[in-house]
Image: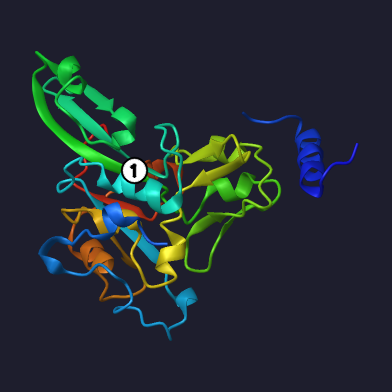
Amino acid sequence: MKISRRDFVKIGAKGLLGGIIAYSIPSLLRNFAPVGGVSRSLAAAYPAELEWEKRYWGFIVDNEKCIGCGRCVRACKLENKVPWEAEYNRTWVERYVIAEDGEVFVDSPEAGRDGFIAEPVNKKYLGLDVRKSFFVPKLCNQCDNPPCVTVCPVGATYMTKDGVILIDQEHCIGCGYCIQACPYGARFFLPEERVVDKCTWCYHRIQKGLAPACVEVCPVGARIFGDLRDPNSQVRKILAEQRVYVLKPDLGTEPKVYYIGFEKGVH
């Protein structure tokens, strides 16, 4: 029986490791006009003649602005051809509900894709003494110390010179080690292709001077993207002027997604 080179590599890697662990946005979103008419294109700030490898990208999420509309999730699925089912997401939105006694409730119906409707999502909160409720968008944190890169047995997961973690799906053997290693739940398995997928900050767009799809469609500017090495970029100014937080800082992954408006209990 003939087997392909890719299947041979898969079989060999599985035996060696002792087993397996389990261009543009379409027209629906293309016509979106950013709030205030301000373009979120990166092209003006970073001319094409500049070397892109000198950039080092960062991402800021403003929880105080997010309204949980789900446009970011839908835009990401459309732009990156992510399956529409809720279990496949490069980005998603969670709702945190904090009761007066400090108990924290988290939900994310359909990954926040369709927003947070009053019914039936809110039934569980009837009679609850709520102190605060807010939305937390999630995505790949593009860590500076990424455990997913370390555990990949074939080097299919790697970091670019501008700080973005990508997956070479031609070489991915679908072992799932990176899924287990990611502490943020940012990776998922594509069963038909038998490879792993995740958020890339729309790397194909930022290389062309465009903002990630989720940033482009956010109606309230809750997602902000830019160059951490540029002192005049919006992300650098926010980091210098405001208090920001990262997810699970004790793990030492050094994430490059920063949050404004964190509350105790967010994880």
Q: Nearer the viewer, residue 124 or 204?
A: 204
- Above/below status of 75 relative to 175: below
Q: Count residues near mark 1 (Cα–Cα under 10 Å), then give few for <14, some for 14-19, many for 20+.
A: many
Which residue corresponds to the image point at 81% horizontal and 48% vertical from the top-left?
5
Residue 221, given in percent of the width and then of the height, sits at: 19, 56
Relative to 115, 5 lies left or right: right
Residue at the top extreme of this rendering = 127
In the rendered image, which quarter contains the C terminus? top left
Residue 170, given in percent of the width and then of the height, sits at: 66, 53
Question: Residue 98, located in which quarter of the rendered image?
Answer: top left
Which residue corresponds to the image point at 18% horizontal and 58% vertical from the top-left?
242
Relative to 102, 151 lies left or right: right
Callout count:
1
Relative to 172, 261 lies left or right: left
Which residue corresponds to the image point at 28% horizontal and 52% vertical from the top-left?
28
Q: Colour scheme of this structure image?
A: rainbow
In the rendered image, which quarter contains the N terminus? top right
Q: Can residue 60 be seen in this view?
A: no
Three-letter amino acid code at disc 1?
Lys
Residue at the right extreme of this rendering = 1
- Element type at mark 1: strand
Residue 53, given in percent of the width and then of the height, sits at: 49, 74
Q: Which of 41 and 226 is in front in this view?
A: 41
Residue at the bottom extreme of this rendering = 49
Question: Residue 135, located in which quarter of the rendered image?
Answer: top left
Mark 1 lies on residue: 138
- Above/below status of 162 relative to 212: below
